[in-house]
Image: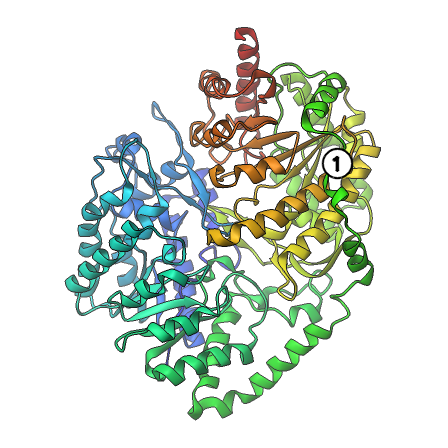
Amino acid sequence: MLTHNLGYPRIGSHRELKKACESYWSSQISLNELLDAGRAIRRHNWQRQHEAGIDLIPCNDFSFYDHVLDLSLTVGAIPARYRPLLDMPDSSELDLCFAMARGYQKDGLDLIAMEMTKWFDTNYHYLVPEFTKDQTFSLTSRNVLDEFQEARALGINATPVLVGPVSYLLLGKEKVPDFNRLDLLDRLMPVYLQILGELQGLGAQYVQIDEPFLALDLQDETKRAYESAYAAITRACPELKFILATYFAGLEDNAELAASLPVNYLHLDLVCAPAQLDQVLSLIPPQLGLSLGVVDGRNVWKNDLKRSLELISKAVEKLGSERVALAPSCSLLHAPCDLVLERDETALPSEIKGWLAFARQKLDEIVTLRGLAQPETHRQYADKLKENMLDMESRRQSALIHRPAVQQRFAAVRPDDLKRQSPFGVRQEKQCADLNLPLFPTTTIGSFPQTDDVRRLRLRLKKGELTPEQYEAAIRTETEQAIRWQEDVGLDVLVHGEFERNDMVEYFGELLKGFAFTGSGWVQSYGSRCVKPPIIYGDVERQAPMTVKWSKYAQSLTAKPIKGMLTGPVTILQWSFVRDDQPRSTTAKQIALAIRDEVCDLEKAGIRIIQIDEPAIREGLPPRQADWKDYLNWAVEAFRLASSRVVDETQIHTHMCYSEFNDIIESVAEMDADVITIETSRSQMELLDAFVSFRYPNEIGPGVYDIHSPRVPTEQEMTALLHKALAVLPARNLWVNPDCGLKTRKWPETRRALVNMVAAAKALREQV
């Protein structure tokens, strides 16, 4: 019975990747030093998995930014605008990769970054491949081959990992009309076959090919593409053994297709969809083995070994142990690195810590399950099974989890709690009269740059080097400076800057009951951006106001309206590690009640505009469309529960980013926010099309400034984007704002970009 891993966290246990990349971008280290940092992380990851006893260890799961972007570079799918960088003598392959991810603005070139969106229903972002009708492919980067040889030189039984050819094309976007990106498969396949052929020649035994779209709704042409692609792959590389990996959902109506593909192992996500095992076992041909994803690769709870063993036993009884492999449900990219690093009892009490497993511990769970599943080794692992069963029962019975007052309040929610007092048209007139904003009002999404000085303040407070009074005085100074600067530059609706906040989810979790926190539980969101998701272990309740003091202070400094800034219930849910002992919808509505208390207190404090960010609404969509309606119903209800108990004059904003809205636009409208701000700059306003064809009734702020890139857009560029928006939106409904919060940016570029943005709005007012 083989054990294998689909992927390991690439950031390093102490975020070494983040520190190295950001040092390179700021010219503090050389390219060779950055490459050395990558090698060190890979070596550590491989050795860790080898020591754990994993048989097949992934390589090419590491990336300096994003694995889909790496594949675009590998197969030569480089958009034409970046081609000049290939001819620059001092530009490396990695520099090209970073330019595609972050944009490029020097050497006389001004290149926008590639579009970025969510990796299925996770909080990981990938760079969207761009395809044209005359697209060509060629082996442009040999990274997958080089990493395999690097691992083999260290004595690692490495299994190269590739996103499969069909999923890669489906992850991309056609950049010109009148063609289907799947039509490019015949041109793409020779590059895949070249890579696989060279891996075969280098002595690779197994190759893992990820085809997550096999677990989604597929059209007939896509199914035919799978059949032709894998017939070609296995015909060309008969000496390689292939693990075809699916995850995040069950195969369902694609099970027969997946089981018929000529591969050696088919990987199933039995955490998301355990019921699919019976279906696949009824279809499986005699030459196919199954990889059972029985350990949760994207949450932090310990594995229920007894439950997993039931699934494993069922597969072994049908197939025999030699045709069964064990693995996490998906790549451990989505899990923190190592629970051993958590030593702060106040943040993560030992009782809760005893319920958890991070990436390193999940490897041990895989090996333990193999030991328990085999009669010859079961006895030596029996004590671990008993201990695990006690842990499971301890968690179920813990008094930390259940709060009767929360459950009673949840049960008392009624339909009227989900409705504003008046329809939007009535509210809009009242808000226009009350707020007296100009046409095309300007604002930002909430946060301003968190400088090293601001972060040091928080660290010094934590270490006891500052008193709470000294810390608050320093934050007041930062807030006042931000308010004065916004007034000077001419923004219409101001924000306090969020200098007191560590993270838009973590900050609120720290102030709510039912949340626990880690010191080193970082996961990658995109590039060097890492987040430390809270752990929702029990019923959620607000104990005291969380943001009122800082919003009220900021409003006291200016006559212009200040936005109260809150994170919405669905985003707090999606960007946390969520308890798995009750429906996610219940947890979301518990959070919504807590946020509603904060909204009401902000309104009482005189805050007339309140933004409830929900960037994760689209991300939370289940992979299968049949499950969308139920999710969207409770997600919209959670937002409305949080936002509806205010007077008509109070303007409710929400923010969404990096989402395709076409499929959910009706649900977005049902949220009934007065103003929605969305990411549109990377797509050059393409994402606005959904709001146009649907005739979205409320006000919209389409982002005109990509904050995920250090590049500073010109006034003319933003004006042109606004004209695109104005061509399809009523002038009175159009706001002007960046794509997202500015926390990760530096002040110099932020100042220049916002000055240009305000100038663009003023120019548009004059023209209109």
Please report the residue visible at 68 percent of the width from the left and 73 percent of the height from the top.
395
Helix, strand, or loop for circle 1? helix
Q: Quadrant of residue 643?
A: top right
Asked if one can make out residue 108 in the rendered structure from this viewpoint, the answer is yes
Please report the residue visible at 41 percent of the width from the left and 62 percent of the height from the top.
252
Work out whether 702 lies above or below 314. Answer: above
Relative horizontal placement of residue 104, taking residue 263 as reference (left or right): right
Work out whether 100 lies above or below 363. Answer: above
Give x and y (percent) for residue 134: 21, 35
Q: How is the image coloured?
A: rainbow
Which quadrant of the rendered structure holds the C terminus?
A: top right
Work out whether 476 lies above or below 638. Answer: above
Which quadrant of the rendered structure holds the N terminus?
A: bottom left
Relative horizontal placement of residue 108, taking residue 702 as reference (left or right): left
Relative horizontal placement of residue 535, taking residue 185 as reference (left or right): right
Q: Quadrant of residue 375?
A: bottom left
Asked if one can make out residue 575 in the rendered structure from this viewpoint, the answer is no
Relative horizontal placement of residue 48, taking residue 209 as reference (left or right): right
The mark total stands at 1
Please report the residue visible at 49 percent of the width from the left and 75 percent of the height from the top.
364
Give x and y (percent) for residue 200: 19, 65
**Label 1 crowd bin: few (<14), some (14–19), many (20+), radius 10 Å:** some
Give x and y (percent) for residue 128: 38, 41
Please report the residue visible at 78 percent of the width from the left and 27 percent of the height from the top.
555
Residue type at mark 1 is: Ala
Give x and y (percent) for residue 578: 62, 59
Along the line of sight, which residue is nearer the eye, 273 or 341? 273
**Farthest top residue?**
766
Q: Determine which residue is flagged by label 1.
A: 474
